[in-house]
Image (tube, rainbow, N blue to C red):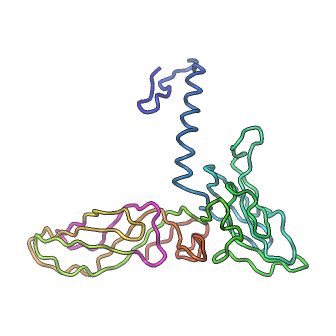
Amino acid sequence: MADTPNWLLLTGLVNYQGVPVSRWNRLNSALDAQVPPFERLMFGNGIYYGGIINADKTVGATKAWINGAHISMMDPDNAISGLTNGLVNYVWLTELQDVTVPDSPKDNVGQFSATTGTRPEDSKSVFLGTITLDLAGNVTGIERWNCKPNDTTKHGPEYIFPLMMRYDWADVDIGIIPPGGVADLTFNHAEGWYFRVPGAVIWWNLPEGWEAVVIDNSSPTSFRVLMYNRSGYTVSATAVRWLRWGLIRPAWTGGIWGRESYPWPGAGGILPIE
């Protein structure tokens, strides 16, 4: 048996080799101390797949991060409890817990419910949108983009679809860089793009002998590049395309990180490159 280099967890076990109680406790204590904070800071609360409110008063297949727990509800027609006729109903996904274990999700599932605006449980609920019913219970409207809950001052982030792998791209005319020269360039994203976790930048159609070196990829809305002409001749770089991958957060609209901004994530698929 041996210890891992970072957390000193037990490794190298063979069949039928017992695990000391102290080592088992260390494993669980280390994971509980380190992984949940990372999940909460990295992902926040929100839906990252599906979460579509349907006209039959259900919510489609949904995946979410709530309170550091991964919630997966893949049924196509999850019922919404608590709907009230004649009102605008605010729809929420709330993490369910195992009552015998504090702060634990139950089988990675949640509960879809409706209120008149108050969050069911501050830290363990995320907002999906609204569904309006007439006095007879018929659906007269569903709003997923610009609406917001009435309790935005209460504890709990209002992130909606906070974590999506997407890319932004643009065709740019860089112009002329003399042989052996360098240009310091900053490229901004389209309106509404915010890379929560910036990723790789890919280049197409750079002239032969040119090199793009990303020197600052920390900004959520732009990146900075040193463009070198390492060839021995002068050429104008036109119709150069950059493409930046990363995890995005939609634009701020109406007091929350809303779903009005492009691209609408739908069922979570990545849009094709045009």
Give coordinates of residue 85: x percent, y percent.
Answer: 87, 74
Q: Residue placed at 79% from the left, 76% from the top? A: 88
Residue extent of the magenta highlight:
189-212
Q: Quadrant of residue 260?
A: bottom right
Give coordinates of residue 264: x percent, y percent.
Answer: 57, 73
- Determine the residue located farthest toward the left in the rendered image: 232
The quadrant in which the C terminus is found is: bottom left
Answer whether residue 34 is magenta in the image.
no
Number of marks in picture: 0
Whether 6 is drawn above or below 248: the answer is above
Q: Residue placed at 54% from the left, 43% from the top? A: 35
Answer whether residue 205 is magenta in the image.
yes
Q: Is residue 100 left or right of residue 173?
A: right
Give coordinates of residue 182: x percent, y percent.
Answer: 17, 70
Give coordinates of residue 190: x percent, y percent.
Answer: 43, 78
Whether 238 is drawn above or below 66: the answer is below
Q: Quadrant of residue 29?
A: top right
Q: Is residue 175 left or right of residue 12?
A: left
- Determine the residue located farthest toward the front in the rendered image: 153
Q: Residue placed at 54% from the left, 73% from the top? A: 252
Q: Is residue 162 left or right of residue 138?
A: left
Q: Residue placed at 27% from the left, 68% from the top? A: 225
- Residue nearest the viewer, comparing 36 with 182: 36
